[in-house]
Amino acid sequence: MILNLTVKDHNLKGTQTLCAALVLLFAITTLSAQEKDALKFYGDLRLRFEKDYSVTGKEARDRTRYRFRFGLVHKRGDNIEVGARIRTGNPTDQQSPHQNFGGDFGSKPLNFDKIYFKYKFESGWFWIGKNSFPFWKQNEMFWDDDVTPEGVSASYSAKDFAGEGSKLTLTGGQFIIDHFNEGLFESTISAAQVSLNKKSDAVDITAATGIYLFNNEVRDSVSYNALNGMDHKIFVASAQVKFNLSSDVLMTLGADFMRNFEDPTVAGFEGETNGFVAQVSVKPGKWTLAAYYANIQKFAVVPNFAQDDWWRFGSGHTNSSDLKGFEIRVAYQLARKMNLVARHYVTEEIVGSKDANRFRLDFNIKY
């Protein structure tokens, strides 16, 4: 669920926006100097050109898009943190904050995608609210970066667990996807992950295993929810190795394996419960060159929460699986916190005969 700031009445919307800005301005001006130092603002802007072509059964399509995000974090001492963030995007699409240019110059929606309280202690943290995915990952094939779960999460780390320069991290979470029948039933995620990191001057190694239990208590009493009326028990194992080839060249190798131990046995997709991802990247100076291979069977992931980048078929939240293909990525750092990223995707269905090509060029700037 994404909290939507837009309303249909334009006068009311303008009044609400002005009131919110005045309240925020007043709150900031009344802070002490020390409190102002504890309040941090951040954000980013993305401008995108996207081209879909050679897509089975569809005309070629060009889109110009943008994304804007703005957040704040207030820290009280060394332990307490409160944060919030707003973003552009359709409030019913948790996977994409992007908006198309056009729409008769109409106004665009803003939504909260982060509202949380976080407490840090010497060896870990916990948070409650709506926040970033708390588990270690190296790509978006299992979980999209734009999907911010709602619930509670906690983590504990033990330094030098496997020798000097190592760290063992245990992370868990309980998240609510949706309520039904006034809270009598819930769709939830129960998740736990163990990760181990080992660093030296020449190499940085991370390995992680996790289990994600997607529980759908309501089957046929509602027409739709994010789990499509299904339970999922997904095991994810990941490994990543970073090499310092020289003072300004970093090479990264990574792999992920996914297995859903719940097989919905949908006709035509029996046993389609595994996923595999391999990736390699090299960063010489300001450049980044990367390649990804993915083979994601129908039920290896939950499509409503996995990546929505690779192809065009339908909407992203219903077509993030049953695909295999490649991504080639080239990025160049223009300045501090500013870059250009070009990506090309070549994909096809695992069960079926559709295929697709997509090119993207992004300009990103953070502040």
Image (cartoon, rainbow, N blue to C red):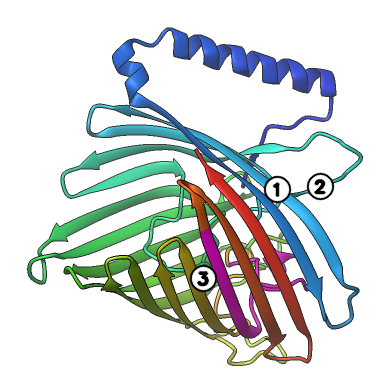
Amino acid on which disc 2 is placed: Phe
Q: In the image, is residue 85 part of the stretch drawn in magenta?
A: no
Q: Secondary structure at mark 2?
A: loop
Tell me the residue at 84%/24% (across/down). 9
Q: What are the residue bounds of the magenta stretch?
A: 307-332
Precedes in sequence: disc 1 or disc 2: 1
Query: Are the residues tagged 1 and 2 within 8 Å (C-beta)?
Result: yes
**Is residue 91 found left or right of 293 in the rendered image?**
right
The residue where tag 3 is placed is: 142
Amino acid on which disc 1 is placed: Tyr
Tell me the residue at 73%/73% (across/down). 358
Q: Secondary structure at mark 3?
A: loop
Q: Which mark is residue 66?
A: 1
Precedes in sequence: disc 3 or disc 1: 1
Q: Is residue 314 visible?
A: no
* Residue 6 spot, x, y in % from top left: 74, 32
Mark 1 to mark 2 CA distance (whole Å):
7 Å
* Residue 168 spot, x, y in % from top left: 19, 65
Tell me the residue at 52%/65% (across/down). 143
Precedes in sequence: disc 2 or disc 3: 2
